[in-house]
Image (cartoon, rainbow, N blue to C red):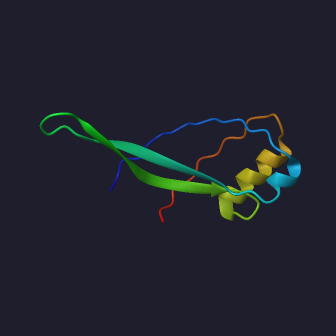
Amino acid sequence: MHSPISLLYTFIHSTALSFLQSVQLRITVYTILSDRGGGEAATELYPVGHVTLGPKSGGMELVHWNQTMTSLRKPVTMWHRLGRD
């Protein structure tokens, strides 16, 4: 079991309204794994999980999307559980 991680990330986007009616936005969180054994340190990105937002999402992701679409130019924040493939 992993410890809970607090992650706050803000982004601003600007695009055509017609595009927003069909887009799905997938945000993937990665961690960096380092191999420090002998010689040069190698790093590898490892996906922790993802969340998908958009008009075809469900649950709290759809609620978040709808709030964002009705609160133009205002920040909308919401916590999401990360899913795995």
Q: Where is residue 6 drawn, in percent x and y?
A: 48, 40
In the picture as drawn, the residue positioned furthest to the left comes out as 38
Q: Where is residue 56 drawn, in percent x and y?
A: 73, 65
User: Looking at this view, is 51 or 13 the one in front?
Assistant: 13
Q: Where is residue 3 drawn, in percent x and y?
A: 36, 47
- The picture quadrant where one finds residue 15 is top right
User: Looking at this view, is 51 or 1 the one in front?
Assistant: 51
- Name which residue lies at 58% across and 36% down: 9
- The picture quadrant where one finds residue 53 is bottom right
Quadrant where the image shows the N terminus = bottom left
Asked if residue 54 shows in the view, the reply is yes
Q: Total of numbered circles in the picture?
A: 0
Q: Eyeballing the image, is 34 above or below 2?
A: above
Q: Eyeballing the image, is 21 above or below 36?
A: below
67 vs 53, left or right, is right
73 vs 2, left or right, is right
Q: Eyeballing the image, is 79 above or below 10?
A: below
- Name which residue lies at 74% across and 39% down: 13
Q: Eyeballing the image, is 55 above or below 74?
A: below
- Name which residue lies at 76% across and 60% down: 55
19 vs 59, left or right, is right
- Name which residue lies at 81% across and 34% down: 73
Asked if residue 81 shows in the view, the reply is no
